Image (cartoon, helix red, strand yellow):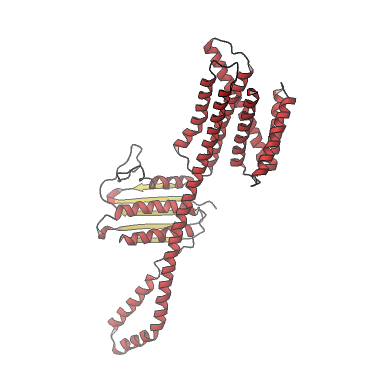
């Protein structure tokens, strides 16, 4: 009975890992969980029937397993037939590789122990458990690689976790079964069940953490865009009031201008026109390029710069549609602007200046930002600039984040800190 429970646990774990892989690479066709559960239950029954009928014939067993899995993909998951065939072949191949690794490990163990490992049913089940855990490590690796291809940042700790949990589970199982290969008891089943649950739960926790991180980033961008809309609304409202006042005062203004002309008071007339032009120029403070990603982040950062009394000299020339993600534009421009503001806000008022330049054509985007700085900019052994803040764990990530965006679009980023001027030049290829 214990052996049968053991086998069912491994089958259920294997189905969970297949669902994880299929969902990540193809996407679920039905949001109703009942359909998924029913489909995989039918798959579970068919697999057991085919295993019983093809007992002793590995080739027939692999073929029947592949056909059943392909049918599950066809009815339950998105994607075309070609991708589903490729995924089916990959699953069977990785399963064979995982079993081969376990067989090789058992051979090595038999060689070093100088003892013949008997082919007990318990040993077969244990080897099956090891191969499923290795297979789960493969699944986690593939899903991480697929996320990497989608330009989702994967931290080093997450790469370490890919192998830490399943390999650690294998070592625990090995210690649990050491010297007890001839039978399976309830304690071993409880240990294995706990380890399988830990593997699955750990995977889902990491997935949820990544989803929450993405949501937080999107919420932060929404906050910035909402702040932009509020500022633009206030600006437009102020402009509308000014226009109403100007229209109301136009008759008086024209009378005053005629009076200056009649009396030959040209200097007073010139001052009057300068005042009017100044009011018109103030209405151009809001940047409006037509690209929400650029407009939102620049207007938001310009407002922060004004709060610190920082003068911003800007040149913007947008000649084509920008197909770069708005999120990426916010991260790139926002981080570089934050670094510039941090560098100049503590300087004397006459030195608080930031200059930036944006230009696009049909294929490329150029962004240049520069600012004065005081002191010495430190670098690490690789030549990367280090933050001047004491808390370097939470700071100093701006250039790294910008560098990730540059890599994503196969661009270039040049940094120069000569003559007390820190400048960053970013060159991106726009994917049409």
At a point 40% along the width and 71% down the height, the residue shown is 283
Left or right position of 358 against 187 = left
Residue found at the very far right of the displayed protein = 53
Tell me if I can see residue 63 in this picture. Answer: no
Number of disc labels: 0
Q: Quadrant of residue 242?
A: bottom left
Q: Measured from the top left, where is residue 414 in percent x and y? A: 38, 47
Horizontal arrangement in the rendering, residue 69 relative to residue 288 (left or right): right
Q: Residue 371: give x, y in percent of width and height.
A: 32, 54
- The image shows residue 127, relative to residue 410, as above or below, that is above
Q: Quadrant of residue 64?
A: top right
**Quadrant where the N terminus is found in the figure:** top right
The answer to which of 126 and 280 lies nearer the viewer is 126
Left or right, 225 with respect to 370, comes to right
- As drawn, the residue found furthest toward the top would be 114
Q: Is residue 303 above or below residue 390?
A: below
């Amino acid at each position: 009975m214990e052996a049968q429970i053991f086998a069912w646990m491994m089958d259920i774990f294997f189905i969970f890992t297949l669902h994880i892989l299929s969902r990540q690479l193809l996407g679920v066709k039905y949001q109703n969980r009942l359909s998924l559960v029913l489909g995989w239950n039918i798959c579970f029954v068919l697999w057991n029937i085919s295993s019983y009928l093809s007992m002793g014939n590995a080739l027939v067993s692999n073929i029947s397993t592949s056909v059943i899995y392909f049918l599950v993909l066809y009815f339950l998951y998105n994607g075309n037939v070609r991708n589903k065939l490729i995924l089916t072949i990959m699953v069977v191949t990785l399963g064979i590789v995982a079993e081969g690794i376990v067989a090789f490990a058992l051979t090595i163990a038999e060689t070093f122990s100088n003892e013949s490992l008997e082919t007990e049913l318990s040993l077969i089940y244990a080897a099956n458990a090891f191969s499923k855990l290795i297979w789960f490590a493969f699944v986690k690796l593939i899903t991480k690689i697929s996320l990497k291809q989608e330009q989702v940042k994967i931290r080093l700790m997450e790469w370490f976790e890919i192998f830490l949990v399943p390999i650690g589970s294998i070592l625990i199982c090995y210690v649990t079964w050491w010297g007890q290969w001839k039978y399976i008891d309830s304690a071993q089943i409880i240990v294995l069940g706990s380890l399988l649950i830990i593997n699955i739960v750990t995977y889902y926790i990491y997935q949820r953490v990544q989803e929450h991180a993405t949501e937080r980033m999107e919420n932060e961008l929404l906050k910035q865009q909402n702040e932009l809309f509020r500022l633009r609304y206030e600006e437009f409202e102020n402009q509308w009031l000014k226009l109403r006042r100007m229209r109301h005062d136009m008759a008086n203004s024209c009378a005053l201008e005629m009076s200056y002309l009649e009396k030959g008071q040209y200097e007073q007339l010139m001052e009057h026109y300068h005042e009017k032009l100044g009011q018109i120029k103030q209405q151009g403070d809001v940047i409006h390029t037509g690209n929400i990603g650029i407009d939102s982040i620049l207007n938001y950062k310009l407002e922060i710069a004004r709060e610190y009394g920082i003068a911003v000299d800007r040149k913007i020339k947008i000649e084509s549609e920008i197909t770069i993600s708005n999120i990426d534009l916010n991260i790139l421009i926002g981080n570089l602007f934050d670094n510039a503001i941090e560098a100049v806000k503590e300087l004397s008022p006459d030195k608080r200046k930031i200059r930036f330049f944006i230009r696009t054509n049909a294929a490329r985007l150029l962004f240049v930002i520069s600012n004065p700085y005081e002191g010495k900019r430190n670098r690490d052994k690789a030549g990367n600039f280090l933050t001047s803040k004491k808390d370097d764990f939470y700071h100093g990530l701006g250039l790294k984040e910008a560098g990730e965006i540059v890599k994503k679009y196969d661009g270039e980023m040049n940094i120069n800190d000569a003559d007390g001027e820190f400048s960053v030049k970013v060159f991106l290829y726009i994917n049409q």
